[in-house]
Image (spheres, grey):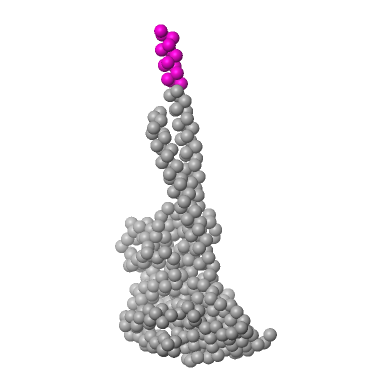
Amino acid sequence: MANVMQFDLVSPERSLASLEATSVQIPGADGDLTAMPGHAPLLTSLRPGVVRVQTADGEKDFVVTRGFAEVSAESISVIAEHAHKGEDVTKADLEDVIADARKAAADAGEEHKDGAEKFVSDLEHLMHDMV
Amino acid sequence: MPNLKDLKNRITSVKNTRKITKAMQMVAAAKLRRAQEAAEQSRPYTERFNAVLGGLAASVGGSDSAPKLLSGTGSDQTHLLVVMTAERGLCGGFNANISKLARAKAAELKAAGKTVKVLTVGKKGRDAIKRDLGEDFVGHVDLTEVKRVGYDDAQGIARDILVRFDAAEFDVATIFYSKFVNVVSQIPTEQQIIPAAFDADADGASTLYDYEPSEEALLADLLPRGVATQIFAALLENGASEQGARMSAMDNATRNAGEMIDKLTIEYNRSRQAVITNELIEIISGAEAL
């Protein structure tokens, strides 16, 4: 069975998904990427975005913010700090997250400012995509 | 000998106490189940996270460019003790055991000439160590309002600690919490979180990964989250331990109340019998006198 891979999505509070996928699109820190079975081992951190999983019975979306993904030839694990099923996320939720992130960016020290601001803009981008 | 009315009142009062402890035991049992579930569900995250971080740390750790969170500040003069206890009492030795361990550690460090700073999480521990370590307190995290500890709470504590670390307020951070073994056994534990300590047998390094962005950037990104993850895991363990400790404490209390009721009831019956006998003697001797 070389054409499917094990996909796991875990957040600190629970494990959200564990299923067989044919391909997975992940919002990597340096750009979106799609992992298919047989992918070279890769470790990437994540931007806030949508993880799109193609399975035998359709497509599943998960919204993740911060975290990282571990890709190997036969499995892919997304380890996210916050993850939700795509259909559960509403615009209002995202707005709350963005408001918090903005506040954090405003409070952040010099050293972390860039990162925090990038986080905000990534979130805004994600929000824009959803609408 | 106490009079009958007093005895009766005491029995009623102990019965009420037994009802309360029984109810608390059952509530603790239900909460324990929930706490264990929460701990169970967070385990995959923690395990994977630590495996990846361990692997990364093993491959970058040796270099000079390793982040301070991993390699330390180069000294161990100032220690931050993060004492995590419960917000509520009536849970046996739970809070006392954690505070005792923290106090012992603080005394040991002070004897070695180190500076000790204390950050408390949970009201009970704060009260318990206030007398000994009151002047070393640097902060307190209040979780009274939190019904169910979430990752956000852990993140908040982690942020607090990291800000202090960035400000060079301390060199080494250790958390104190209670490991849940089973309902009757919870082990107070200390765990060093900064600089991060990993199991040497982390096998994550065996696979050769591509890294995006670079290995160092990834590690620098993950280490602060590692702190949050460890605190979250500790909070969950603590939650389960607290409920377990409360459950067995309340079970004992219920049993003791039962024993006390039995004893008091026997005493009550005896006194009642004595009163009746007395009255009979009085009546009979009164009749004989006629």
Q: Residue at x 53, y 65 (%)?
A: B37
Which residue does the image show at 48% across and 92% down from the upper left? A31
Horizontal arrangement in the rendering, residue A94 relative to residue A5 (left or right): left
Observer-nearest residue: A4 or B230? A4
B91 lies above or below B41: above
Query: Is residue B188 or residue B151 the one in the foreground?
Result: B151
**Which residues fall within the magenta stretch?**
B277-290
Residue B66 pos. (x, y %): 46, 83
Describe residue B101's horizontal placement relative to residue A40 as left or right.
left
Q: Identify the residue at image location x=43%, y=57%.
A: B95
Question: Is residue B21 visible from the viewing direction of this image?
Answer: yes
Residue B252 magenta: no
The quadrant holding residue B44 is bottom right
Residue lying furthest top in this view?
B290
Residue most extreme to the right? A1
Asked if residue B209 shows in the view, the reply is no
- Residue B289, magenta (yes or no): yes
Residue A13 image offset from top left, x and y in percent: 49, 72
Residue B221: image quadrant is bottom left
